[in-house]
Image: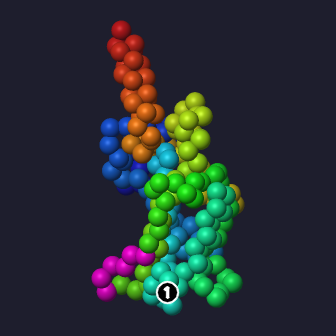
């Protein structure tokens, strides 16, 4: 299952995290996958077999750019200019290497906060979903990702729930 489609509309999920949020596979230039919620990006990057520990990596994240490479090597594993701004100093930012037992090579997993100002300035939380990770990627279709509102700041989630309850009451009347 790759997510739910609603005639190009985004499912607004605020009661629990989506059960089947899709991962989009791209090459940039190395193989990677990404997924998203309204305020977070999740990234997985396949590492070359020469990478055995995090100390061998050179990871650089700015508000507009990502570069993952190995120390002493000018060629990046992954590099790109983000579609929109991220918060490299966000409270959820982290990256680490994971490795399934008996599998080589390891995988870098990263969590990035999207620019928090977007959540406070939007007229619709569905617009917080990015159509692509990097500016030069092909856009994904509307409705592929559910709007995972569970990762919104608590005050915005409460506001959405209140607005949703009012809207439901009005529609029943």
The correct choice, above or below, for 100 with respect to 16 in the image is below
The correct choice, above or below, for 9 with respect to 31 in the image is above
> Residue extending furthest top?
173
Name the residue: 57% across, 73% down.
Answer: 59
Name the residue: 32% across, 43% down.
Answer: 16
Question: What stretch of residues is rendered in magenta?
Answer: 97-102
Task: Identify residue for label 1.
Answer: 51
Name the residue: 36% across, 53% down.
Answer: 20
Q: Can the viewer see residue 29?
A: yes
* Residue 12 shown left or right of residue 72 in the figure: left
Residue 23 % position (x, y): 46, 60
Residue 166 % position (x, y): 39, 18
* Residue 6 shown left or right of residue 14 in the figure: right
Q: Is residue 94 magenta?
A: no
Residue 26 % position (x, y): 56, 67
Name the residue: 32% across, 38% down.
Answer: 15
The correct choice, above or below, for 87 with respect to 170 in the image is below
> Dividing the image into 4 quarters, which one contains the N terminus?
bottom left
Q: Nearer the viewer, residue 31 or 67?
A: 67
> Dividing the image into 4 quarters, which one contains the C terminus?
top left
Residue 44 % position (x, y): 47, 68
Q: Is residue 100 magenta?
A: yes
Predominant SS of the magenta segment: loop
Q: Can the viewer see residue 36?
A: no
Q: Nearer the viewer, residue 22 or 108?
A: 108
């Amino acid at each position: 299952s790759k997510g739910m489609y609603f005639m190009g509309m985004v499912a607004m999920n605020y009661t629990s995290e989506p059960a089947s949020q899709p991962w989009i596979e791209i090459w940039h230039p190395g193989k990677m996958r990404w997924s998203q919620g309204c305020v977070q990006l999740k990234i997985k990057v396949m590492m070359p077999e020469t990478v055995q520990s995090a100390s061998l990596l050179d990871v650089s994240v700015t508000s507009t750019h990502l570069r993952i490479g190995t120390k002493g090597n000018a060629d990046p594993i992954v590099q790109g200019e983000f579609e929109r701004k991220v918060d490299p100093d966000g409270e959820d930012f982290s990256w680490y290497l994971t490795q399934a037992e008996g599998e080589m090579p390891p995988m870098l997993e990263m969590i990035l906060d999207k620019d928090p100002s977007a959540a406070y300035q939007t007229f619709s939380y569905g617009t917080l979903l990015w159509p692509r990770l990097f500016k030069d990627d092909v856009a994904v279709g509307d409705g592929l990702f559910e709007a995972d509102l569970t990762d919104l700041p608590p005050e915005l989630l409460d506001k959405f729930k209140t607005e949703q309850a009012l809207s439901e009451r009005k529609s029943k009347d």
